[in-house]
Amino acid sequence: MPKKAKVRKVTKKEIIETPITTSSPVGSPVQKSMNPKILRGALIIILIALLTYKLGPWLVPTIVDNKLVTRFSLWSRLEKTYGTQTLDDLVNEKILDAAIAKAGVKIEQKKIDEQIAKLETQFKDAGGLDEALKQRGLTRPDLVKQVKTQLEVEELLSDKITLTDAEIQKEFSDNEKTLYTGKKLEEVSESIQTQLKDAKLRDAFLAWFAEVKKTAKVKSFGL
């Protein structure tokens, strides 16, 4: 009859003193280095997540019934609807700026500030100038640029918008029984001058700018 193997009891002291090992069995995923492809994929996913978090509202401005309305689709629609006109406006602005610079026209900041102040007063009772600009999709810098350009054009074409007393009298006489009913010439002279100057400036600008555009070098590649 075979002898029974003796089972040695492990003392409490041995349990405490036995070092704990963290080694894994051979072939364990912990021991293997991460696959480079998997690492790259993980980094790409993290990068996309960060970009989505930061740029999400910019890339996707709206979601309707879980369907994305992307910024690209918005731009495409705007380009089809307003693209040609907007491009023409940008081209005309560049041509106008270059022509004004070439002519050497300079406007003092004081005159620009005075014009802005007039607009502030004009829109005071309509929520203020800033609100008026917001409704038109404009900013203060946009307004300053427009005012500056307007004053530069007026200076450039000043010899084309002079008025005579005869022209003012004719405008009053032609509209005395309609626009100026019950008014005297002295009462409406200032408004008549403004009206006639604006009309002359518009006509003079259109004629002048048409000639300027003929000499501009524009390369268009389409939309």
Image: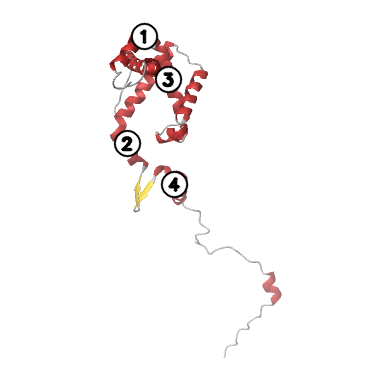
The answer to whether 34 is drawn above or below residue 170 in the figure is below
Contact (CB < 8 A) between labels 1 and 4?
A: no
**Circle 2 or circle 1, nearest the eye:** 1
Can you give x and y, in whole percent of width and height, for residue 215 in the image? 32, 13
| Amino acid residing under circle 3 | Thr
At 71% from the left and 74% from the top, the residue drawn is 13
| Amino acid residing under circle 4 | Thr
Q: Judge the density around disc 4: few (<14), some (14-19), many (≥20) Cα neighbours within 10 Å.
A: some
Marks 1 and 3, the one that precedes in the sequence: 3
Q: Residue furthest toward the front? A: 182
Q: Judge the density around disc 2: few (<14), some (14-19), many (≥20) Cα neighbours within 10 Å.
A: few
Q: Which residue is mark 4?
A: 52
Q: Could one spot residue 13 in this view of the protein? A: yes
Can you give x and y, in whole percent of width and height, for residue 188 in the image? 38, 18
Label placed on residue 165: 1
Label 2, label 1: how many angstroms apart (C-alpha)? 49 Å
**Circle 1 or circle 4, nearest the eye:** 1
Marks 4 and 2, the one that precedes in the sequence: 4
Label placed on residue 199: none
Marks 4 and 3, the one that precedes in the sequence: 4
Marks 2 and 1, the one that precedes in the sequence: 2
Q: Which residue is mark 3?
A: 149
Can you give x and y, in whole percent of width and height, for residue 142 in the image? 44, 28
Element at label 4: helix
Marks 3 and 2, the one that precedes in the sequence: 2
Q: Judge the density around disc 3: few (<14), some (14-19), many (≥20) Cα neighbours within 10 Å.
A: some
